[in-house]
Image (spheres, helix red, strand yellow):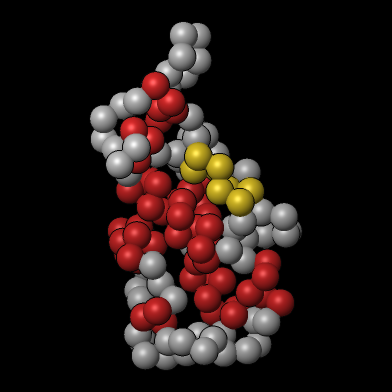
Amino acid sequence: MSACCSAKPGPQNRASEGRPAPNSLPVAIIGGGPVGLAAAAHLLEHGLQPVVFEAGLSVGTAPLDWGHVHAFSPWRYNVDRACRALLERHGWKAPDAEAFPTGRALVEDYRRLWPLCRKSPPPCA
């Protein structure tokens, strides 16, 4: 295994003189859809700060384009473990695991992550 993938620091993952250590910098996430927000939830679990960049007007822009259509998989496959844990800590009640969400329902649940992410400095973009 190369040093970049191991727990042992190699030269490429140590801070250079005058530069911050990599784990002190926020992690950029491109896309504020369900997958991007799931990535942010995983980073928060590990004490890292995400910065989410979304090209649309709000998180979940793409699924809102098909908001009236039911997903092809039930909720149990559409809610990431880290997202579920973060949402439940803030009062979220999971929908029926076997129900098929619409794009809009999926976005409405994942949008609850956005303010949670924004409260973590530095804020999501």
Q: Inspect this view and state whether residue 34 appears.
A: yes
In the picture, measured across the screen, residue 58 lies left or right of residue 119, that is right
The residue under the point 35% across, 76% down is 94
Task: State whether residue 78 is above or below residue 70.
Answer: above
- Residue 36 drawn at (x, y percent): 53, 58
Residue at 38 percent of width and 46 percent of height: 44
Give the vertical position of 74 relative to 30 (above or below): below
Which residue occupies the extreme left position in the image? 8
> What is the quadrant of the C terminus in the image?
top right
* Residue sticking out furthest to the front: 1
- Mark count: 0
Give the residue drawn at x 56%, y 48%. 29
Q: Quadrant of the N terminus?
A: top left
* Residue 47 seen by the camera: no
- Find the residue positioned furthest to the top: 17
Q: Nearer the viewer, residue 39 or 84?
A: 39
Q: Viewed as shown, does residue 51 lie left or right of 58? A: left
Q: Position of residue 55 (x, y in %)?
A: 72, 55
Please give left or right for residue 41 compared with residue 31 in the image: left
The answer to whether 2 is drawn above or below residue 96 in the figure is: above
In the rendered image, residue 26, in percent from the top left (x then y), is placed at 50, 35
| Residue found 29% across the figure and 38% down from its top | 6
Give residue 7's position: percent from left, percent from top. 26, 35
